[in-house]
Image: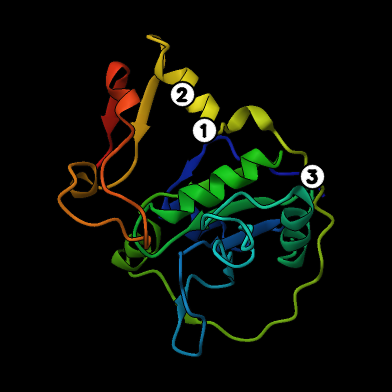
Amino acid sequence: MKRRILKSDLVSVEWLHSNLQLSGLILLDATINKKIDNDSERVPSARFFDIKQKFSDTNARFPSTLPSIEQFETEARALGISNDSFIVVYDDKGIYSSARAWWLFKTFGFNNVAVLDGGLPEWKEQNFPIEAYKKESIEKGNFTARFQPELMTDFNGIIQFSTDSHTLILDARSALRFQCLVDEPRQGLRRGYNPKFKKSALYRII
């Protein structure tokens, strides 16, 4: 089978609807904190990409910490993902946690992945079919993870970037959180942002 290469990091619901039956396509529902039961809906054939429990280090100090290369590889294989797969990820907000899943695959060396533009809401808006989740047997994939450290940084890296006039630091929280008008959703985290960033070009994304 000839490997299919996605030419964009974003695909439309119309494209997915037309190509849903393509061999090698793995469709992932990356909705965060989703409880899967008989009432849970999905785009047909989607598999649940559990960011919180399967694709994060649950023993780390902070939630949603990057998993180890071994953990990511094991869980990706359990979803049937192979080196010749091509992946489309979506979530039930539009584009929210699906971007996290996209970045995780890139960070672990898999580039043949795209986000569904508009996610499940846009899919439903176009009256495309949905179905309930059901128990399924998934053949284990052969995906091999290759960690790409240049696609992430740590606390020390952020401090260094904050002194670089050519670097933009983007805050992807909501406007209310950025402006300290609401509490952080994670217990124990303070409002605001690091004052060391004030000299850098700091932007918020709404």
Q: Residues within 10 Å of mark 1 (few under 14, many from 20)?
A: few
Q: Nearer the viewer, residue 118 or 68?
A: 68
The alpha-carbon separation of the residues under discs 1 and 2 comes to 6 Å
Query: Mark 3 or mark 1: which is in front?
Result: 1
Task: Relative to 23, say whether 84 is above or below.
Answer: above
For label 1, the residue is: 155
Residue 159 disc label: 2
How far from the left and from the top, in percent, is residue 102? 55, 46
The disc placed on residue 2 is 3
- Which part of the image, by quadrant, shows the C terminus? top left
The amino acid type found where label 2 is placed reads Ile
Look at 32% across and 64% down and name the residue there: 121
Residue type, mark 3 in image: Lys
Q: Is residue 62 left or right of residue 135?
A: left
Q: Are marks 1 and 2 in contact (CB under 8 Å)?
A: yes
Spot occupied by residue 55 in the image (x, y as percentages of width and height): 63, 59
- Badge 2 local density, few (<14 within 10 Å), some, or many (20+)? few
Q: Is residue 33 visible?
A: yes
